[in-house]
Amino acid sequence: MTRRVLVTRPEAESRELADALRRRGIEPVMAPMLAIEPTGATVDDAGRYRAAIVTSGNGADGLAAATTRRELPVFAVGEATAGRLRGHGFAPIDAAEGTGLALVELILNKVRPDAGPLLWASGDEVRVDVADELGRHGYEVERVIAYRAVAADELPAAAGRALAEGAAGGVLFFSPRTAKRFASLVAGAGLAQRAAAMTAHCLSAAVADAARSLPWAAIRIARRPTRDDLLATLDDATASDPD
């Protein structure tokens, strides 16, 4: 019988992830908890920045829409985001280890505070305020809000059916906001107890904490906050349950 897993990422990010799941013999069930809306922000004088900072794949798309300066150096939060930037033609790119704080540390090691202002392309909500973190060390960071993430107001139909029929064995969560929204919508639909037969696969401990309001059979946390490590939690041999 084919395994099924709910995918809660926004639609654009879900396509490549769905392909990766199918290669593992897992059928993805799309259940986006956020819709991405570009703001149309532009940066007319990108050449005055020492480098750009991007903390998500959507930020990479937003930076590409905001400026034509593809030679602008970019610091990316992780390899997946770096890949999105390369797809848009940006170079050079330095990638951190997948967290906002790791990205801050990378910039501290690579750029002097007096080297020039940094441009941060972000969403309207962020988990780590990069401008604030770097500002404590004397860096000038200018933030442009390139997109907004709008929360789903109801459980997607395919996800609701999979939960009601007990047809999915797990859910992939990449952010605390997504996990919290999913839990709220599932509870609101009267399906909370269905989670008792499912596993929550979480990118980090913070994501797992946001998902705990549902009575999961198990919660798996990626060893590192990367997509590949999250997918590895789908294999019992590499997964571990938190206390």
Image (spheres, grey):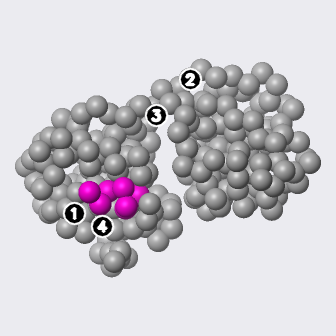
Residue located 69% across and 35% down the image? 143
Q: Which secondary structure dominates the residues rendered in magenta?
A: helix
Separation of marks 4 and 2 at Cα, in angstroms: 35 Å
Q: Which residue is mark 1?
A: 216
Residue located 32% across and 44% down the image? 181
Q: Amino acid at mark 2?
A: Thr
Name which quarter of the figure residue 51 lies in: top right
- Around disc 1, counting alpha carbons within 10 Å, would you say few (fewer than 14), some (14 to 19), or many (20 or more)? some
**Residue 171, x across and y down, in percent:** 28, 55
- Around disc 4, counting alpha carbons within 10 Å, would you say few (fewer than 14), some (14 to 19), or many (20 or more)? many
Between 91 and 142, the residue placed more toward the observer is 142
Quarter of the image with the C terminus in it: bottom left
Separation of marks 2 and 1 at Cα, in angstroms: 36 Å
Callout 4: helix, strand or loop? strand
Callout 3: helix, strand or loop? strand
Q: Which residue is mark 3?
A: 149
Q: Amino acid at mark 3?
A: Ala
The tag earlier along the polypeptide, 4 or 2, is 2
Q: How many marks?
A: 4
Between 60 and 210, the residue placed more toward the observer is 210
Q: Amino acid at mark 1?
A: Trp
**Residue 208, x across and y down, in percent:** 37, 61
Separation of marks 1 and 3 at Cα, in angstroms: 26 Å
Q: Are marks 4 and 1 in contact (CB under 8 Å)?
A: yes
- Around disc 2, counting alpha carbons within 10 Å, would you say few (fewer than 14), some (14 to 19), or many (20 or more)? some
**Residue 144, x across and y down, in percent:** 67, 31
**Residue 107, x across and y down, in percent:** 76, 55
Q: Amino acid at mark 4?
A: Ile
Q: Which residue is mark 2?
A: 39
Q: Which residue is mark 4?
A: 219
Quarter of the image with the N terminus in it: bottom left
The tag earlier along the polypeptide, 3 or 2, is 2
